[in-house]
Amino acid sequence: MKRKLTYWGVGVSGAVLLLTLGAAYQGQQTIGCAENQSTRTCPHVMELGPQCQVEIVRMSFTDHVESLLYLHQIPDAAREEYRFAVVTLKITKPVGQSLSLAAADLTLHYYHGDKTEVAPCEGLSWFKSDSEAEMPILMNPVPGPGFIKQTTSPEHTAGTMVYIDAVFGFMEPDTRECWICLGHPAATEPFTCPAPAWRNESHESMTPKVPPGLQAPPA
C-alpha cells in the first residue's frame, strides 16, 4: 500500500510540474505578444442586435449542388440517408451598413428526431435582394467551409434587407427544428502573434521539456 501511495504521489507531482511548465511556456508566448497592442477589430464578424438580425426564411433539400467550379453530390451509398440543405437567410440591417459573412462562422444547430446535431456551412451564394433569385454558390472541392467569404456590394450595403443562400451537408430526412448560429469573438482583446509569427527554419516543439531525473510513474 505504501508503494502505491508513493507512486501516486510521484504521479501527481509530475502532472503538476508538467502543467506548470506548460502554463509557463504558453505564458511566455502571451507576455511576449502583449507588448504589441492592436487597435484593429475582429474581421469578418456580423454584429447582431436590435438593428441587425438573421433568420431562416426557406430551406430546400437536394442530393447535388452546382457550385461555380464543381458539381457536389451526395455519394450514391449515402443518398438514402442524407441530403444537402440549401438555407435562405434574411438579414435586416441599418442603411449603409456593409456586411461580411464567412462560411466558417455559420453553423446550423438542429434536431433530427430526438437527436441533436450541428452542421458546418459548406457554401455561400452572393448576397441578393430577392429571396427567390437564383445566385451562384461558392463551395470548396472538399467538405468544409474553407476560406469562403461574401461581402455586400454597394447596392446591398445601401439597403436595409438582403438575402443569402447557405449550404449545409449530410442532413437527415427527419430534420426538424433548426437554428442558424453565427460565430463571435470570445474576447474583446486580440492575441497578437510575434513578427514574424513563424520562420521556415523553426522546428521548436510545443511539448514542455521534462527536467532530467523526472520519470513518469510506472503503470
Image: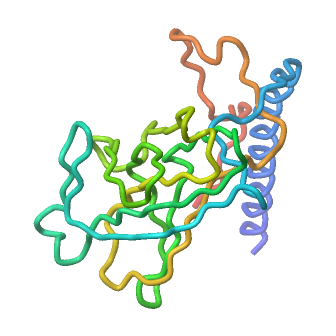
- Residue located at (39% from left, 81% from top): 175
- Residue located at (74% from left, 52% from top): 15
Question: Toward which corner of the image does residue 50 lie, by quadrant?
Answer: bottom right
Q: Assign the N terminus to one quadrant of the image.
A: bottom right
Compared to residue 172, the image places residue 195 above or below, namely above
Q: Which colour scheme is used?
A: rainbow
Left-right relation of 83 to 31: left
Compared to residue 214, the image places residue 13 above or below, namely below
Return the residue found at the far left. 76
Left-right relation of 173 to 105: left
Between 76 and 3, the one nearer to me in the picture? 76
Compared to residue 211, the image places residue 177 above or below, namely below
Between 37 and 124, the one nearer to me in the picture? 124
- Residue located at (70% from left, 44% from top): 95
Question: Toward which corner of the image does residue 202 lie, by quadrant?
Answer: top right
Q: Assign the C terminus to one quadrant of the image.
A: bottom right
Question: Toward which corner of the image does residue 33 lie, by quadrant?
Answer: top right
Q: Residue 109 location in percent, x, y?
A: 53, 70
- Residue located at (62% from left, 45% from top): 159
Q: Residue 208 location in percent, x, y?
A: 69, 34
Left-right relation of 77 to 170: left
Q: Residue 181 location in percent, x, y?
A: 59, 62
Q: Residue 209 location in percent, x, y?
A: 68, 31
Between 136 and 175, the one nearer to me in the picture? 136
User: What count of labels does the image hold?
Assistant: 0
Left-right relation of 80 to 101: left
Compared to residue 206, the image places residue 51 above or below, namely below
